[in-house]
Amino acid sequence: MGAHPRGRDGSGEPAISSDAPISRGDPSYVTAPCPVCAAPDATMRTILLEVPYFGEVFESVFMCAACGFRHADTLLPRIGEPTEFSIRLTQERDMVIRAVKSSSATVAVPDLGLLWEPGPASIAEVTNVEGLLLRFEEAIGRARVLYPEPEARARADELSGRLKALIDGRASATLVIKDPYGNSALIGGPPRVARRVIPADEAAELLTGEYILDASDVGQPVRLRPVRDPADP
Ligand SMILES: [Zn+2]
């Protein structure tokens, strides 16, 4: 489960799609071999969530106690085709708009030059707009540690300030989620949230979050290679 940093906006009226997802039934557990360390008794936990105004979301978490490998994902049975959701964020209450981010999602705030592409440690979560923006803030924080040069630091501080203004409703910017498998969504509906089917040629440019373990060079460290074309695995 993702964090839900903000529930309602405090104005007394229900915010758009701010209602928390409701779990339907108990989680189910399946034992499976770990793809990383081959321990035979890793666990896959699956739960079906009902998200208000949207429908069913399957959330799964694969966990290996032996090596610590963890992989979470979401599955939206209702969409299933390459889909883009976008919203122009203009006010604080936009932060509570619910978001489903699968491991194959590309999340971007083009106005701030922020891009989050799927990777081997891609986090899937049922969260809200603020939750997604806070992930960018975390990434900026990591960059500040990795690149301590004054110029990089100034850039990080500036970006962090603009992100905070957006979260506080003092600035506006567009948030975009693209998913080649249609397993991600912003749940608000028109006219605030725009939805578009991504044409095949554009979808082919998106990273999918699946990585091939490339161990062809014996003696070399194993490399992770991103899969770019969902139509041609
Ligand atoms: Zn393992």
Image: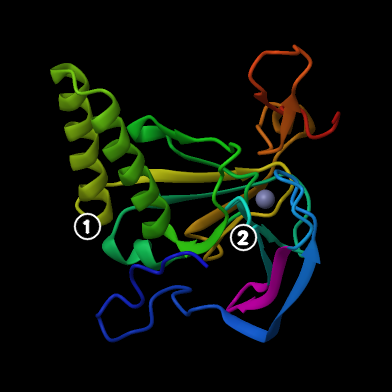
- Could you tell me how far apart the alpha carbons at marks 2 and 1 are, in whole angstroms? 39 Å
Looking at the image, which residue is at 56% across and 42% down?
Answer: 121
Task: Check disc 1 and report its element: helix, strand or loop.
Answer: loop
Relative horizontal placement of residue 153, taking residue 20 as reference (left or right): left
Q: The residue under label 2 is which amino acid type?
A: Ala
Residue 167, position as x, y percentages in the image: 27, 54
Res. 185 in view: yes
Name the quadrant containing residue 158: top left
What kind of secondary structure does the magenta stretch mostly adopt? strand
Task: Check disc 2 and report its element: helix, strand or loop.
Answer: loop
Relative horizontal placement of residue 71, taking residue 169 as reference (left or right): right
Looking at the image, which residue is at 75% across and 13% down?
Answer: 218
Q: How many marks?
A: 2
Q: The residue under label 1 is which amino acid type?
A: Asp
Relative horizontal placement of residue 69, taking residue 56 as reference (left or right): left
- Residue sitting nearer the eye, 8 or 216: 216
Residue 89, position as x, y percentages in the image: 36, 52
**Ligand 1 contact, mark 2 (Cβ < 8 Å):** yes
Highlighted magenta segment, given as a residue range: 42-56
The residue indicated by pointer 1 is 168
Looking at the image, which residue is at 72% across and 62% down?
Answer: 76
Name the quadrant containing residue 111: top left
Residue 12, position as x, y percentages in the image: 28, 86
- Residue sitting nearer the eye, 122 or 177: 122
Tell me, for residue 65, which label it has, or none.
2
Looking at the image, which residue is at 57% across and 53% down?
Answer: 68
Quarter of the image with the C terminus in it: top right
The magenta stretch spans residue 145 = no
Q: Are marks 2 and 1 in contact (CB under 8 Å)?
A: no
52 relative to 142, above or below: below
The magenta stretch spans residue 52 = yes
